[in-house]
């Protein structure tokens, strides 16, 4: 998945010492006297307990309060966190060596047993963790049975060999497992504190974490205030003296607060303000690549889209540059592969969609549709399903227009509310359907596995033995080059069989004050630790 994972060829994976994830302040930089930052989050966190977190809102705060086995750098590559190194011989059993200077914010040492306790707690049905499924996705031995209540939590495939050595057993080879441990659901929590305070353990004065910061104050729906954790192993490289998270669930309101000087970093901004913001404050507007793809899925199980020629024609006739630059025009990139370009360990090979200009693609599309038996005397008619959204509707109109102009296709657009749309999608009641996917982890398989025949996310109902076998073999691969080749072969099958038509790659717009430095804007999963940030004199 990332650089560390790619060294997993039956050997010890490299170690990194020192301030691997700390603020990197260039020599000669003039720092502001006041090192305090205000960060916007999109709503009040449901919980500060990593096991109770439900998504990005909680994760942004949890990453400052806790630390997992690994962290991510600005590019999304994994770097040591509590774990200094890790090794595997078969991608199924992993040994993590923990740093001896890792401590909780109360000064107690962080041990391998803390991870055993925390991960068992995650999968225990009594915990009701909304992210218990992540342990199953990660392939932890017995996770599925434990979550289903069929086995006790202490049978989970994790054990402490000693205080600083953690052993993890998986139910199948997962070559990218180390990178999954950066997920907030796998952060450790202090057993003694959790058991002492119960549900109140995350309150101000009770909460004990092992991250670079600790909780100082919290006013629900108003603010969360964090200050440096003096017991953090890399505390010497923390520059900020205070981090305040402000929950605001309206993008427009957050943008107004930003413009008023109340916020230093926003989580987003209204798309309709993009051009104005770009004109007014160009050096503060960012649209970094996100680990996500917007695509159309074709129903491969019924006519007319069960014909590869029809699917190819429809895909070729979509002018992705026009979609990204004109129809959207807010920084998105054309998608020529299912896997986003920013995905760690992915090295895309140009396909026909990139090698030919749109006129050439349109000519091929016309020929393919003619070969499939369609033309002026027998126009192709199909349905295009999408869920209610201004963006989805705008794209559907644009693409239907392209299909009509280039191929003479008559498109019946079907707009449904979310629940009805999901029912239609799941029952295959569509010809073409709008879809999107944001990776659960930063590795190509989070996208490519969706098109395996048994995956619940296989909307197109694509069924290819060759594709399934290829993804199965990739899961056992320990050689980085061979793994990359497998992923490109999978993308080649998608390009040839066209179960889906990738349309554009997501971006994640945000505003950042020019005096804020160290924000990892290039991280595709939007993982941003406050410890890497600092304020320059302004």
Image (cartoon, rainbow, N blue to C red):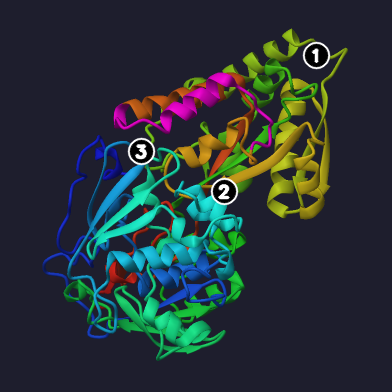
Say if 246 sits above or below 251 in the image: below
- Indicate left or right for 222 with 408 as reference: left
Nearest to N terminus: mark 1 or mark 3:
3
Q: Residue at x 34, y 69 (%)?
A: 114
Q: Is residue 233 above or below residue 17?
A: below
Residue 23: image x %, image y %?
23, 67
The spot of residue 153 in percent (x, y) is: 49, 61
Give 441 or 494, whichever is nearer the viewer: 441
Judging by the rendered image, the residue that carries numbered circle 1 is 374
Most foreground residue, 510 or 446: 446
- Which residues are the magenta region? 458-481
Residue 25 visible, this angle: yes
Q: Residues within 10 Å of mark 2 (few under 14, many from 20)?
A: some
Pick whichever of labels 2 and 3 is earlier in the sequence: 2
Assess whether residue 491 is covered by the magenta stretch: no
Disc 2 marks which residue?
329
């Amino acid at each position: 998945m990332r650089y560390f994972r790619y060294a997993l060829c039956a050997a010890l994976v490299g170690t990194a010492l020192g301030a691997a994830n700390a603020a990197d302040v260039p020599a000669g930089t003039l720092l502001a006297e006041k090192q305090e930052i205000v960060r916007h989050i999109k709503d009040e966190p449901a919980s500060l307990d990593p096991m109770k977190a439900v998504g990005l809102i909680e994760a942004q705060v949890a990453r400052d309060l806790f630390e997992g086995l690994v962290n991510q750098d600005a590019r999304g590559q994994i770097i040591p966190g509590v774990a200094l190194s890790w090794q595997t011989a078969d991608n199924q059993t992993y040994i993590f060596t923990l740093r001896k200077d890792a401590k909780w914010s109360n000064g107690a040492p962080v041990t391998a047993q803390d991870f055993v306790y925390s991960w068992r707690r995650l999968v225990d049905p009594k915990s009701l963790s909304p992210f218990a499924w992540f342990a199953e996705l990660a392939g932890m031995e017995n996770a599925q049975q434990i979550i289903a209540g069929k086995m006790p939590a202490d049978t989970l495939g994790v054990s402490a060999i000693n205080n600083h050595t953690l052993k993890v057993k998986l139910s199948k080879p997962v070559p990218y497992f180390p990178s999954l441990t950066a997920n907030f659901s796998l952060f450790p929590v202090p057993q003694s504190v959790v058991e002492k305070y119960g549900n109140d353990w995350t309150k101000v004065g009770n909460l004990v974490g092992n991250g670079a910061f600790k909780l100082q104050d919290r006013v629900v729906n108003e603010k969360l205030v964090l200050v440096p954790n003096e017991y953090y192993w890399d505390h010497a490289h923390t520059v900020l003296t205070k981090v305040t998270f402000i929950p605001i669930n309206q993008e427009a309101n957050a943008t107004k607060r930003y413009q008023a000087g109340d916020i230093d970093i926003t989580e987003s901004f209204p798309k309709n303000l993009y051009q104005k913001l770009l004109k007014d404050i160009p050096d503060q507007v960012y649209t970094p690549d996100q680990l996500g793809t917007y695509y159309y899925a074709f129903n491969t199980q019924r006519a007319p889209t069960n014909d590869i020629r029809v699917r190819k024609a429809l895909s070729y006739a979509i002018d992705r540059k026009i979609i990204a630059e004109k129809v959207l025009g807010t920084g998105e990139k054309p998608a020529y592969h299912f896997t986003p370009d920013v995905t760690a360990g992915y090295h895309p090979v140009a396909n026909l969609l990139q090698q030919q200009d749109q006129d050439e693609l349109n000519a091929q599309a016309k020929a393919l549709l003619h070969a499939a038996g369609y033309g002026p005397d027998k126009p192709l008619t199909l349905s295009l399903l999408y869920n209610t959204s201004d963006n989805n509707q705008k794209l559907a109109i644009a693409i239907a227009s392209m299909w009509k102009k280039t191929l003479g296709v008559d498109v019946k657009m079907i707009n449904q509310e979310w629940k009805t749309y999901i029912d239609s999608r799941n029952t295959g009641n569509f010809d073409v359907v709008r879809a999107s996917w944001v990776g659960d982890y930063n590795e190509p398989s989070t996208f490519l596995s969706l098109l395996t025949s048994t995956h619940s996310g296989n909307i197109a109902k694509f069924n290819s033995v060759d594709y399934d076998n290829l993804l199965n073999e990739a899961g056992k691969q320990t050689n980085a080059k061979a793994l990359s080749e497998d992923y490109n072969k999978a993308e080649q099958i998608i390009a040839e069989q066209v179960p889906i038509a990738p349309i554009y790659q997501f971006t994640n717009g945000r505003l950042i004050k020019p005096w804020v430095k160290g924000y990892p804007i290039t991280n595709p999963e939007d993982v941003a630790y406050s410890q890497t940030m600092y304020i320059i004199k302004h």
